Image: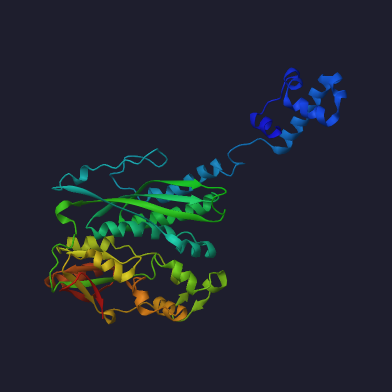
Amino acid sequence: MYRWLVGNLRLWSVQELVSSELFDNHKSIHGEAVTTNREIVAIHLNIYLLVYVLAAGTMDYKNAGVDIEAGYKSVELMKKYVQGTMRPEVLTNLGGFSGAFSIDAFKNMEKPTLVSGTDGVGTKLKLAFIMDKHDTIGIDCVAMCVNDIACAGGEPLFFLDYIACGKNIPEKIADIVSGVAEGCKQSSAALIGGETAEHPGLMPEDEYDLAGFAVGVVDEKDIITGKELKAGDVLIGMASSGVHSNGFSLVRKIFKMDAETLNEYHEELGTTLGDALLAPTRIYVKALRSIKEAGVRVKACSHITGGGFYENVPRMLPEGKRAVIEKASYPIPPIFTMMAREGNVDEKMMYNTYNMGLGMVLAVDPADVDKTMDAIRAAGDTPYVVGKIEDGEKGVTLC
C-alpha cells in the first residue's frame, strides 16, 4: 500500500484515510482504541507516508538506470567524428529523427540499384572490454557491412550504427563512434545516424553491443553475380589484417581471456596477443573501386568471413564451377599459426572458420590479372594470385 502511495506521490485527506484500508490496517495493529481518535490516526498515517517518500526518494528515469544527460553528452562528444564522414549528398544534421541522402548524383546511371548490408562485431567485443580499448571496434562494424556491399560491385553511400550498453559512459560511447567514423571515412560512407540505447538490468554496466547497417548503390549492369565465370578465370586474394571479426568464440577458447594474457608480447606476432587479435578488419572498398576504375570487370567476389573458405568461396560461384585455391600461394599471418598450435585446431577447421590471411577473393579474366594486381596495390592493399576456376561440382578445393 505504501509503495502505491509513493507511486502516486500525494498525501491523503483525513476523510479519505479514516475510511480507507490503511486505517483498518492501522486499527488492527493498535487496537479498537484508535476509533475514538480518527483524526490523530490520519495524521500519523500521513507522517508515515512522508517519511517513506523522503527515504525512498523521487523516482525518475535516471534512478531507473537511464541517464538522459549522459546521452546528450555522448552526442556532443561524437559530433566531431561524425562530421568528418559527411558527403555532399547528406541533407540532414546529426540529432534528427532520420537521415536524408540525395540520389541526384546517381541519375546518370542506367538503372541505379540499391544494395545493403548489416552486421555486428560479435564476441570480439569481449577483448575490447578486457583491454579497455574501444576506438577500433567500430571499424570492424563498418567493414563487415561495406565489404559485403563492395562484393556486389556497390559503392557504399551511408551507414547507421546501433550501440546497446548497460550504462552510457559518454567518453566510451564517443570512442566507439570514433572507430565507426574512421571505418566510414575509409569506405567513403557518410555516418548519417544511429542509436545509443541504455539497457539497465539487461546488460552489465561495463559492456555493450555494436551493430550497423549500410546502404550502397550500383548500376544494375555492374552488379557482380558470378554468372560470367568460366574455366580458366584467375582467383586473386587480398591480404587480411588478421582474424578480422569472425571466429572469436573459438579464439576465446584457445586463449585465456584476461589482461595479463592479452597484454603479453609475442616475438612471432611482433606485438601483444591482444593487439594482434583486436586489429581492425580490413576494408576493401577502395581496392574494388580502383579495379573498376582500371577498366577491369570483376566476375565474382567473396568476402571471407565466418565459415572461412569452405562456406564463403562457393557463395560467389554458379552451378558447374569450382574454385581451386593453392594454400602455399600466399603467406599465412602468424596469428593463425599460433592459434592452430595453441588450440590444437585441425587445419581444415581453421580454413572452415577463419580467413587465414585472405579477407577477400575475386575472379577476373586471365588477361586482366596484371591490371587488377596493379589497381589493388595502388589502393594500398596487397594482392596474391591464389588459384583458378575449373569446371566441376560447385565448391572449393584447397590444395
Q: Depth check: give the residue in front, 216 or 322.
A: 322
Would you say residue 368 is visible in this rendering?
A: yes
- Looking at the image, which residue is at 15% across and 47% down? 111
Q: Residue furthest top?
A: 15
Specify whether 287 is left or right of 297.
right
Q: Left or right: 270 with respect to 157?
A: right
Judging depth in this view, the residue of 155 and 387 nearest the camera is 387
Q: Nearer the viewer, residue 272 or 185?
A: 272
* Number of marks in picture: 0
Query: What residue is rendered at 37% in x and 75% in y?
Result: 350
Query: How far from the left and from the top, in percent, is residue 371?
Result: 16, 69
Determine the image quadrant of residue 308: bottom left
* Residue 61 x, y percent position in the rendering: 58, 39
Identify the residue at horizontal 20%, vertical 48% (top origin): 113
Which part of the image, by quadrant, shows the C terminus?
A: bottom left
Q: Give the vertical position of 181 relative to 7 (above or below).
A: below
Give above or below for 204 relative to 253: above
Residue at image point 42% right, 51% down: 81
Q: Is residue 297 above or below residue 103?
A: below
Image: 295 above or below 256 = above
Taking the view exactly as shown, the residue that stands out farthest to the right is 33
Front in this rendered view, residue 119 or 383: 119
Left or right of 302? Residue 9 is right
